[in-house]
Image: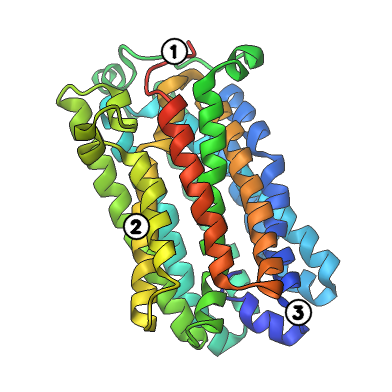
Amino acid sequence: MSIAILPMSKEFNWNSATVGLIQSSFFWGYLLTQIVGGIWADKLGGKIVLGFGVVWWSIATVLTPFAARLGLPFLLVVRALMGIGEGVAMPAMNNMLSKWIPVSERSRSLALVYSGMYLGSVTGLAFSPILIQKFGWSSVFYSFGSLGSIWFALWLTKAYSSPKDDPELSEQEKRLIMGGSVSKEPVTNIPWKLILSKAPVWALIISHFCHNWGTFILLTWMPTYYSQVLKFNLTESGLFCVLPWLTMAVFANIGGWIADTLVSKGLSITSVRKARTSIELLYTIMQSIGFLGPAFFLTQLSHVKTPLFAVLCMACSQGSDAFSQSGLYSNHQDIGPRYAGVLLGLSNTAGVLAGVFGTAATGYILQKGSWDDVFKVAVVLYIIGTLVWNFFSTGERVLE
């Protein structure tokens, strides 16, 4: 949508406020199924929940061009429906990873899975301009929406919610994966009062909001920034948008490897997830890099003089953002592995609210202000997130 919105806004004569509303409508539905998706995943298993989500959002994607031509209200509804499907994805993935991955490999595995999301953005941003130029903007939604059916066929035959359900695993493999950590049985009751009484849980929630404000602004508005400020055409906007997401995919895996290596060498999980000393600050704090790196590079955008350096700042911002995979996004499984889906649902609800407000607010800010104003808000929230994370989060288990 971030690429297709450029020709769509011209065809339907949408202003920046309307574009912001459309971009944010996805998050309305996405918000609704975060906690529900986590509950479903923890109770029913990640395979069923994620499979449902992909089929749902694929259908909504294919219906998007029809809705746009019927009128703005229909488009907003379909985009919200797409968000409902995608809302269950991250809680379901987190639930499955908590069951399939030993602690010593957690950061690497999470980074690898999430880098698939970044590479998906790379693919979409690279091919969307080509599809639009040859077949029109509708082809973007038809093409990528139909891919869900291929994935679903493979998922049904190859995926399992837990290692104990996989008939192809040997007993030795199951013992290696399942031994010595957390119960792999489905959750029957969720201790909401206990969960919400823990300061590290609230640190996750607040940090996720602060982190996602900047991330979602770049995700949804970057092509528009390239078009309006850097004067790139549609093809150039799509191609240059690829670089930051490609950088994220690479740096997420580098950060995951560093974090798991430090854990394997005997450092506490807390020292890897956040800073306690100046030495740890230099070598081990993934999440502070994930906050302060993007904040620094966004502040440089108002000083750059050439499009090349602007693109470089965007790439460095997103690349440092990817270190959050080994901090914020790994932390749910550290503090409460049995409730990893619910915890991700809780914190990502706050993250989605940042997407709702941030994406829409950007459109209104641009009508009365400038891109510098947009980036200043994101920088302030990154700094707040850094402070909250370092004062209140932990890498130790607080929920049994």
Q: Residue furthest left?
A: 265
Q: Nearer the viewer, mark 3 or mark 1?
A: 3
Amino acid type, callout 1? Ser
Asked which secondary structure carries label 3, the reply is: loop
Please give the residue where the numbered disc 1 appears in the rendered image. 183
Q: Nearer the viewer, mark 1 or mark 2?
A: 2
| Up/down of 68 relative to 187, above or below | below
From the top left corner, tell me how far across and down residue 64 is, in percent.
71, 67
Please give the residue where the numbered disc 2 appears in the rendered image. 319
From the top left corner, tell me how far across and down residue 53 is, in percent.
62, 45
From the top left corner, tell me how far across and down residue 117 is, in percent.
45, 54
Q: Residue at point 38% right, 82% down?
A: 305
Asked which secondary structure carries label 1, the reply is: loop
- Horizontal relation, residue 229 to residue 108: left or right: right
Q: Contact, CB < 8 Å: mark 3 with mark 1? A: no
Please give the residue where the numbered disc 3 appears in the rendered image. 14
Q: Residue at point 25% right, 27% down?
A: 104
Q: Earlier in the sequence, mark 3 or mark 1?
A: 3
From the top left corner, tell me how far across and down residue 390 is, in percent.
40, 31
